[in-house]
Image: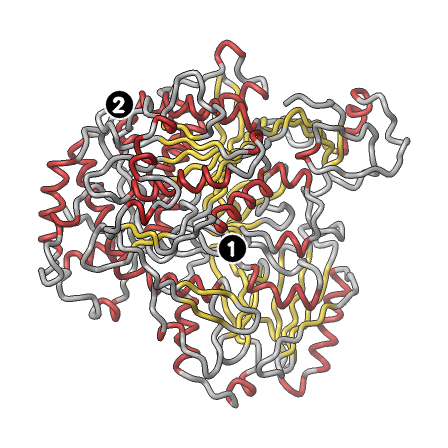
Amino acid sequence: MEIDSKYRRVINLQPKGSGFYLQKFRLYETCSNFYMIGYDKTKTFWKVLKIDRLESSELIIHEDPTIYSGSECLDLRKRIHEGNKSTGGLKFVSRCYGIIGFIKFLGPYYLLVITERRKIGKICGHAVYAITKTEMFPVPNSTVLSNMAYSKDENRYKKLLSKMDLTKDYFFSYSYHIMLSFQKNLSNSQTELAVYETMFVWNEFLTREIHNQLQNTLWTVALVYGFFKQATLTISAQDFILTLIARRSRHYAGTRYLKRGVNEKGHVANDVETEQIVFEDVPEGSPFGVTAVVQNRGSIPLFWSQETSRLNVKPDIILSRKDFKFEATKLHFEDLVQRYGNPIIILNLIKTHEKRPREMILRAEFANAIEFINKDLPEDNRLRFLHWDINKHPRIKATTALIRLGDVAANALELTGFLNCQLIPTSRTEELLKLSPVSCGSRRDHVKKDLYEVDAEIDNECEELRGAYYVKVSSVQKGVLRTNCVDCLDRTNVGQYAYGLVALSHQLHALGFVDVDNINIDSHSSIAQDLMQIYENMGDTLALQYGGSAAHNKIFSEMRGQWKATTRSQEIIRSLQRYYSNAYMDPEKQDAINVFLGHFQPQEGAPSLWELNPDQHYDVRKHGSSVTAERSRYNPSISSRQLFHDMQLDQCLGSSSFQFHEGALFDSSNFLDVDWLSSSGNSCEEETYDRSSIIGSPSRGLSSDSVTNELKEETHISAPDSGASLKKEQTTGDIRVDAKESKEIPRQFSEKFVRWVNDGDLLFP
C-alpha cells in the first residue's frame, strides 16, 4: 500500500519515558531493608530502590526520587552502612541485571532477579538479551523468617516454581519493546505499565505489585517466551540482517493435552505471534531500510480437548462443550482484528477425510463456526477460510508442496501487505531536511495516528527531536494470516516457513536487494536453505515448549535430501519423547506454568494445587484462585445431526460450497477447500500411528520394547516416502527425570528408556 512519503518521528523505540533506562543493578542488604542500586549503560544516572525486610507477609517498596551520580551513590551507601553498623551494616548480596518480579505462596514474598545474561541480538541499536542465570531471595530477614511457620506446601511450591527454566527461550530488552511487533512499536502510544500488560509479557503477574507501588517499570524487565534468532544473510553479494521472533501468549498457556482449543474469553491455546524483520546491514548511524511481516498460529478456536492418557498414544478428539452461537470463537477473531486489523485469513491444515473421524470433526465444526460468524459481518471484513488437507496425498514431493503453499502465501501477502519503511537517525537531520519541504522549526500540535490509519495522512512537519529516528513509511501491514493444524506445531511450521519465504522475497525487493524480474527466491537456493533452518529451529523450540519433543520435520528433511530410513527412526524417537512428556511430565509442567503466570494463587485453607485434577483449567480471580473443571464431554459416537446443528456432516466435509476453483483463491464465499494443494507428507503432531495397533487394552503391559517394536512396525507400514529430520536431538534438559524421581516412573518403562529420557541417549543404536 503506497502512502504519502513524509517523515514522522519514531516515539517508542526507546521505551523509558524518563529519557534513560537502568540495565545494571547491585543488590545490598541490611537487617531491615534490601537496597537495589541501578544505573544506566554509561553510569551517568543512578537510582536507589528500598524493599522492606521487617514485614512478614506484605510487600513494601520505596523508590528514592533522586537521580544520583556515581560518587553521590557511593556516599549514600557509606551513610547507610554507618547507620546500620549495630546490626551488621550494609552487605553486598548480588550483581543483577533486572527484577523478574515478586511472588508469594503461603509464606513470605520472594524476590526474583536476573544474575547473568547474554546478548542474542539487537534491533535498531537496542540490545536483546537471554537469561543465563537467576536467583530467588526471600524478602524478610532471617529473624522474621525463623518466626514464621514454614509448611511442606511452601517448600513444594518453591520447588514447583523452580521447574520454570527461565534460562531457556526467554528474552528481553531494556530499551526496546520486544513484546510488541516492529510496526506496533512505531505507532505505540501506550504507557509503560500498559505495555507490560500485553499478552506476550510472561512475568506480568510477578511484576504487578512493584508496578502498582512505583508506577514505573525502571527496575523490571519484560520477559517474552518463545523464540528469537538473528542472522546475517547474503544475497547477490549484499548482506542483510534477518530477525525471526516468536512470541507465545501468556493467556490460556500450557501444555499440549491440558490446554487445547479456546476458553470463554476467546483466548486460544498455543497462540504464537511470529515476526520476520529484515534490516539493511549498514554502518551504525546511517539511514537504513526495514521491512517486517507478522503471522499467527493458534489452536482451533472451539471448545475441544483430548483426554491425556498413559495407555493411549492417540486420544480421541472431543468437542467438550457446544457453543451454539460460537461466542468464544467470535471473541477470538475480534481480538485478532484488534491486534492486526482486517483481513483475517485462516489456513487450516487438518485432515478432511479419515477412516475414524477425529480431525475431520474439528474441521467441520470450524467451518460451521466461520460461516456462522461471517453472516453478521460486512463482506469486506469476513473471515477468509482456506482448507488444505496436508496429509491427503502423502507422496507429493516437498518442493511441490512448498510451491503450492507459496501460492497461498503470495495471495495472503497481497491482501495484508507488510511494513516497509526507512529510518534516519535524528543525528542525520540534515539529510531529512533535504528530503522534506517543511522546516523542522515549523511546529504545531497534531494528532499522532495509529499506523493502521497512516494511509489516510502522515503529518508533514518535523517535531521536537525526542526520538531516536525519523521514519519514512512506504507501506504497513493490515490483517494477518493465521495458520493452524491440530496442535499448531509440525504442519503449521511448514506453512509458516512457506509464508516466510514468500515474504522474504518481497521484503528484499522492497529494500532493493532483488529486482522485479527475480523476486521469487528459489526454494533450493542457499538463502532459502538458511531461512528453512531458522524456521526449523523455531518449530523445534515451540514444539518442545508445548508438546514435549522437537517437531516432525519430514518436508524439511526431504528438502535437505536426508536418508529416509534414518529419519524414520528419528521420527519414532520424537514420537516417544512426545508421548512420554504428555503422559508423565505435562501435569507438573502445567502446574508450574499456572503458578508462574498467577493462574493459580495459593491460599491458606484452600486446596493445594496438587490436590486438584491435573487436567482442570484454572481461572484467575482477583483474590486467590478458583478452579473450574470442564467435565461436560460429547461422546464422539453421537450422530452428526446432534453434533453439527446448522449443517449436516456430509455437507461440511464434501459440499461443493467448500471447493476451491483455480483463479479465485479468495473469492466471496470465504470457504475454500484447496484440494489442488496435495498433501506434503509432512507428519503431523497427531502421530500417524493407529492407537489400537500400539495398545490393545488398558490391561496390556506397556514396556518400552513393545512400544518400540510396534511403533517400528507401524512406521514401516504407513510412513510416507518423504523423509524426516536427521538432526540429532539434545534431549537433556528437555524431558528431565531426577534420580530421586526416576524410582517413581512406572515399572513398565525399562531403565534404558529412562536413561534416554534423562540423558538423551539414542534408544535405537
Instruction: Tell which of 545 and 3 is nearer to you.
Output: 3
Residue 397 in the image, given as x and y percentages of width and height: 26, 23
Vertical placement of 83 versus 163: above or below? below
Classify mark 2: residues with Cα within 10 Å, few (<14), some (14-19) or many (20+): some
Q: Earlier in the sequence, mark 2 or mark 1?
A: 1
- Locate the N terminus and report the quarter of the image it occupies: top right
- Locate the C terminus and report the quarter of the image it occupies: top left
The residue type indicated by label 1 comes to Lys
Residue 23 in the image, given as x and y percentages of width and height: 63, 54
Q: Which mark is residue 397?
A: 2
Instruction: Tell which of 756 and 373 is nearer to you.
Output: 373
Q: Tell me which corner region of the image, top left, top right, bottom left or bottom right, holds residue 305.
A: bottom left
Could you say whether the residue bearing mark 1 is in a helix, strand or loop?
loop
Residue at x-position 68% and y-position 35%: 451
Residue at x-position 56% and y-position 67%: 94
Instruction: Tell which of 642 and 409 is nearer to you.
Output: 642
Classify mark 1: residues with Cα within 10 Å, few (<14), some (14-19) or many (20+): some
Q: Which residue lies under the disc numbered 1?
A: 265
Residue at x-position 66% and y-position 75%: 60
Could you say whether the residue bearing mark 2 is in a helix, strand or loop?
loop
Q: Tell me which corner region of the image, top left, top right, bottom left or bottom right, holds residue 565.
A: top left
Q: Are marks 2 and 1 in contact (CB under 8 Å)?
A: no
The residue type indicated by label 2 comes to Lys
On the question of residue 577 being in view, the answer is no
Vertical placement of 590 versus 178: above or below? below
Gap between marks 2 and 1, in whole Å? 41 Å
